[in-house]
Image: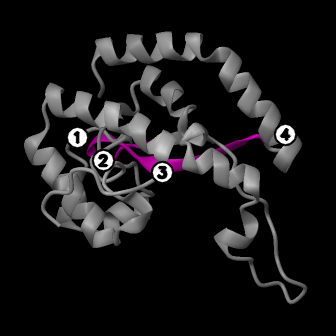
Amino acid sequence: MPGLASRLFAALLLFAAAPLLAAIALIVLIGLGRPILFVQTRSGLNQRPFRLYKYRTMMTGRTREGRILSDAERTPPVGRILRRTRADELLGLVNVVRGELALVGPRPLLPETLDAMGELGRRRARVAPGITGWAQINGNALLSNDQKFALDIWYIENRSPLLDARILMTTILVALFGERIFYRRSV
C-alpha cells in the first residue's frame, strides 16, 4: 500500500489538476462519446483486486461480419494523443489516493495475466503497482512482455526513493517526447 505521503501528494495533484482533468473529460466526451471513463479490475499489492480508473481512449467497433476491430482501428486520433501524452492515466491518481496504486511501481495487470505468470507474478505483486514505472520509461509498447517483466523485476530488486524520483521525472519526458529507451536495464 502506498505511503501516506504519496497519497497526500496525489490528492494535491488531483486538486491542482482538476481543470485539466475536466478538460480531458470534455475532450473524451466530444471525441469519443460516452462513457468517458474506462474502468477495469486489476491486481494490486499481493494480487488484491481493485478497480483502475482511466480516461477512455478507444471506440467500440466491429466489422459487418462481427469481428472486433484491432486496437489501432478503434483508437481515433484523440485517443492516440491521450495515450502518447499519458493523459489517459491521470485518473490513476484517484487510485493512489485510495491506496490501491503507488505513483511508481510495476504496471497493474489483469488478475488472469498475473495468475498466468506463476511465481514471477507473485514476486511482481509483492510491491504496489504504479501509475508509471521502470518499464514504462524504457520503451513500454516498444518492448515484449518478457522484457517488461524483466524490467519490473529489476525495479523491484533495486527500488529506492532516488530511483522513483528519476522515474517520475523521466515520465514527464516520455509524455512530452514519446516512448523511447532511456535507462534500460536487465533486458
Magenta segment boundaries in residue numbering: 36-49
Q: Residue drawn at (40%, 67%), measured in percent from left and top? A: 142
Q: Please tell me whether residue 89 is drawn above or below residue 124 in the rendered image.
A: above
Label placed on residue 29: 4
Q: Please tell me whether residue 140 is drawn above or below residue 161 in the rendered image.
A: below
Q: Residue drawn at (47%, 46%), measured in percent from left and top? A: 177
Q: Residue furthest left?
A: 157
- Check disc 3 and give the amino acid type: Gly
The first of marks 3 and 1 along the sequence is 1
Question: Decide: marks 2, 3 in contact (CB < 8 A)?
Answer: no
Q: CA distance from mark 2 to mark 3?
A: 19 Å
**In this rendering, which labeled residue sits more in front, label 4 or label 1?**
4
Q: How many marks?
A: 4
Label placed on residue 127: 1
Question: Decide: marks 3, 1 in contact (CB < 8 A)?
Answer: no
Q: Residue drawn at (31%, 57%), measured in percent from left and top? A: 181
Asked which secondary structure carries label 2, the reply is loop
- Check disc 2 and give the amino acid type: Pro
Q: Residue 178: where, in percent of width, then height?
A: 48, 51
Label placed on residue 178: 3
Question: Decide: marks 1, 2 in contact (CB < 8 A)?
Answer: yes
